[in-house]
C-alpha cells in the first residue's frame, strides 16, 4: 500500500480524542455519536488492512520507518505479521462495541469517557504494531493511564482500590521489563525488535533478561499467582472496561512472550519451560475451581479468564507449531468470547441491578433472546465443536501432549471443570424458573434492545467463523510462527518437573557475578 495504514490506525483515535475535548461537555449525544463514528472509521481502516494483507507472506507488512530520537538507534518503526494482525483487528472491533455497550450505562462525564477509550484504542494498536523495543514499552505502559481512569472514575463501589491495584501490579512488573530492554540495547547496540531476535545473547545474561520480561508479561497475562488484581479490576470496572480488559489487554502478556522472551532468549525459555508448565496447569485448575465457587456472575467470568489464559501460556512454551498456533488462536477466541460474556453480564446488571447469581433466574422465560445469546457464548467458552473455543484448546492439547502427556491431562481436566461451571451458571440463571407469584411481584424487565443485538450478532458470527473456517486465522499465524523462530526448543516429558525440582545449572552465576554491560557512549559534561 502506498499510504501509512498503521500510522492512520494509531493516529486517527488520537486526533479524534483531541477533537472530542473541544466539544461541549453537556452535549452527551453528540459526544457519543462522535466517539462511535471515530471508532467505526478505525474499524473500517482495520478491515481494509486485513483485505490488503498478503496471507502468503510470513514477514512484516505495511512497514513504516523513520528516525525518532537523534544520536540513538530508537526509531518510529511499525509493521504487522500474521500474529499481530488479528490482535489489532480485535482492538478495532471491540472499541465501537464498548461505545455501544456504554450508551446508557455511563451516566456522567461522557466526554472524558470517550477520550479515554480512544486513547486506549490507539495505545493498544501501537503495542501490537511497533517494531522498536523502546517504543513497545511506551505503548505498553500508555495503556495503563486510560484504563486506570476507566476503572477509577466509572467503576463500582471499590473502584479506587481496584484501579490502584491494577496500576501498581502492572507498573512494577513493567519497570523490570524496561531494565531488561535497556540492557539488551547496550549489549546488542540496537532497539530494533527484528535485529534483537537475531542477536545471540550470552546464556548467563539470558536468564536475568528473561526474568525481567517475565515479571511484566506474567502480570499482564495474568499468570498464577500474580493474577489477584484481575478479579478486582473486572468486578469494579464498568462493562466496557471489562470487555476491553479481557478482550485485548490480557493478550499483551502473551504477545510479549511471542515477541521477546521466546525468540530473543531461547535458552532461558527452554530452561524455564517446566516452571511455565507448572504455573499454567495450576492456573487452569485453580481458576476453574474459583469460578465454580463464585456467586457473582462477573467474578465467575473473570476467574474463567485466568483458566483460559493458562491454556495460552502453556501452549506458547509447548515447543511445537501446534501448541503455539493453538495458544495464539486461543487468545483471539478468548478475546471475542470473554468480551461477549462480559457484555451479557452488563446487560443483565443494567436491568436487575445485581450480579448475584442466586438473585437472577427465569431468564429463559422473561428474556428469551438474551438467554439464547448467553447459552451460545457459554458453550463457546467451554469449547463446543464448531465454535472458536474448540480450535484453540484442541491445538494446545495436541501440542502439549507431544511434550508432556501428564500436563495435557491436567489442562484437559480444566476443560471438564469449565463445562461444569459454565453449564451450572446457565442452569441457574436461564433454566431455573421462579414460581408465578414471585415473577408477578418483580418489576418487569425487557429483552435485548436493537442496540444490544447490534453488538452481539457480529461476535456470534466471528465465533462461528473461527470455529468452522479456522484456516482463515490459523494460516497467517502458522507462517509467522515458522518464519520468526518463536518456538521454544522441544522438550520431552522427562524434562518437565515440578517447580521445586528445578535446579539452576552450574553455569548460571549470581547477579553480582555477571559483568555489567558496557556503559552508554553518551558523555555528559557539567558547566560551572
Image (cartoon, rainbow, N blue to C red):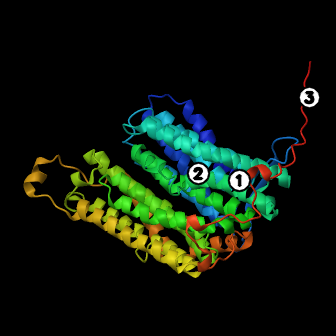
**Gap between marks 1 and 2 measured at Cα:** 17 Å
Task: Tell me the crowding category of disc 2: few under 14, some 14 to 19, or many 20 or more residues within 10 angstroms, Cα based.
Answer: many
**Gap between marks 2 and 3 measured at Cα:** 47 Å
Residue 303 image offset from top left, x and y in percent: 41, 57
In terms of depth relative to the viewer, which is nearer, 397 or 240?
A: 397
In terms of depth relative to the viewer, which is nearer, 388 or 25?
A: 388
Residue 130 - label: 1
Residue occupied by mark 2: 42
Frontmost of labels 2 and 3 is: 3
Residue 525 - label: 3
Residue 435 image offset from top left, x and y in percent: 10, 58
Does residue 499 lie above or below 455 as drawn? Answer: below
- Give the mark, 2 or 3, whose residue is nearer the N terminus: 2
Does residue 412 lie above or below 208 as drawn? Answer: below
* Element on which disc 3 rests: loop
Residue 138 image offset from top left, x and y in percent: 68, 44
**Gap between marks 1 and 3 measured at Cα:** 34 Å
The quarter of the displayed image where residue 50 is located: bottom right
> Does residue 460 appear anywhere in the picture?
yes
> Does residue 150 appear anywhere in the picture?
no
Frontmost of labels 1 and 3 is: 3
Contact, mark 1 vs mark 3 (Cβ under 8 Å): no
* Element on which disc 2 rests: helix
In terms of depth relative to the viewer, which is nearer, 158 or 384?
A: 158
Residue 124 is left or right of residue 504, and the answer is left
Residue 318 image offset from top left, x and y in percent: 60, 73
Task: Tell me the crowding category of disc 3: few under 14, some 14 to 19, or many 20 or more residues within 10 angstroms, Cα based.
Answer: few
Contact, mark 1 vs mark 2 (Cβ under 8 Å): no
Q: Quadrant of the C terminus?
A: top right
Amino acid at each position: 500500500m502506498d499510504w501509512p495504514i498503521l500510522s492512520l490506525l494509531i493516529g486517527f483515535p488520537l486526533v479524534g480524542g483531541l477533537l472530542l475535548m473541544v466539544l461541549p461537555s453537556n452535549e452527551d449525544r453528540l459526544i457519543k455519536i462522535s466517539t462511535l463514528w471515530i471508532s467505526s472509521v478505525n474499524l473500517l481502516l482495520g478491515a481494509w488492512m486485513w483485505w490488503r494483507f498478503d496471507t502468503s507472506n510470513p514477514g512484516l507488512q505495511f512497514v513504516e520507518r523513520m528516525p525518532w530520537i537523534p544520536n540513538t538507534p530508537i526509531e518510529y518503526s511499525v509493521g504487522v505479521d500474521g500474529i499481530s494482525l488479528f490482535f489489532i483487528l480485535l482492538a478495532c472491533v471491540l472499541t465501537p462495541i464498548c461505545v455501544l455497550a456504554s450508551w446508557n450505562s455511563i451516566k456522567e462525564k461522557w466526554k472524558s469517557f470517550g477520550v479515554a477509550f480512544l486513547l486506549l484504542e490507539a495505545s493498544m494498536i501501537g503495542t501490537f504494531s511497533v517494531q522498536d523495543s523502546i517504543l513497545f514499552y511506551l505503548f505498553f505502559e500508555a495503556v495503563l493511564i486510560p484504563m486506570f481512569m476507566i476503572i477509577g472514575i466509572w467503576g463500582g463501589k471499590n473502584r479506587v482500590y481496584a484501579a490502584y491495584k491494577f496500576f501498581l501490579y502492572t507498573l512494577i512488573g513493567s519497570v523490570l521489563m524496561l531494565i531488561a530492554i535497556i540492557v539488551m540495547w547496550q549489549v546488542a547496540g540496537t532497539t530494533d525488535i527484528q535485529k534483537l531476535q537475531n542477536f545471540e545473547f550470552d546464556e548467563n545474561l539470558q536468564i536475568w533478561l528473561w526474568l525481567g520480561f517475565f515479571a511484566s508479561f506474567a502480570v499482564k497475562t495474568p499468570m498464577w499467582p500474580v493474577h489477584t488484581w484481575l478479579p478486582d479490576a473486572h468486578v469494579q470496572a464498568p462493562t466496557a472496561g471489562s470487555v476491553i480488559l479481557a478482550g485485548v489487554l490480557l493478550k499483551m502478556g502473551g504477545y510479549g512472550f511471542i515477541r521477546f522472551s521466546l525468540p530473543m532468549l531461547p535458552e532461558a525459555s527452554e530452561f524455564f519451560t517446566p516452571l511455565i508448565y507448572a504455573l499454567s496447569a495450576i492456573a487452569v485448575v485453580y481458576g476453574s475451581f474459583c469460578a465454580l465457587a463464585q456467586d457473582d456472575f462477573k467474578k465467575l467470568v473473570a476467574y474463567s479468564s485466568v483458566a483460559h489464559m493458562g491454556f495460552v501460556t502453556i501452549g506458547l512454551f509447548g515447543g511445537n507449531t501446534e501448541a503455539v498456533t493453538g495458544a495464539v488462536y486461543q487468545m483471539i477466541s478468548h478475546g471475542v468470547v470473554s468480551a461477549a460474556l462480559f457484555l451479557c453480564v452488563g446487560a443483565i446488571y443494567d436491568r436487575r441491578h445485581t450480579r448475584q447469581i442466586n438473585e437472577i433466574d427465569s431468564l429463559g422465560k422473561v428474556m428469551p433472546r438474551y438467554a439464547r445469546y448467553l447459552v451460545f457464548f457459554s458453550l463457546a467458552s467451554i469449547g463446543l465443536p464448531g465454535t472458536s473455543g474448540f480450535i484453540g484448546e484442541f491445538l494446545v492439547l495436541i501440542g502439549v501432549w507431544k511434550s508432556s502427556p501428564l500436563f495435557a491431562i491436567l489442562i484437559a481436566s480444566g476443560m471438564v471443570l469449565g463445562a461444569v461451571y459454565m453449564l451450572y451458571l446457565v442452569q441457574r440463571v436461564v433454566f431455573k424458573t421462579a414460581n408465578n407469584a414471585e415473577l408477578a411481584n418483580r418489576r418487569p424487565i425487557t429483552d435485548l434492545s436493537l442496540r444490544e443485538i447490534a453488538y452481539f450478532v457480529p461476535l456470534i458470527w466471528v465465533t462461528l467463523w473461527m470455529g468452522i473456517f479456522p484456516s482463515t486465522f490459523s494460516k497467517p499465524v502458522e507462517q509467522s510462527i515458522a518464519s520468526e523462530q518463536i518456538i521454544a526448543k522441544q522438550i520431552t516429558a522427562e524434562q518437565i518437573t515440578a517447580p521445586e525440582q528445578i535446579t539452576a545449572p552450574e553455569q548460571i552465576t549470581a547477579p553480582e557475578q555477571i559483568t555489567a554491560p558496557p556503559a552508554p557512549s553518551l558523555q555528559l559534561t557539567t558547566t560551572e
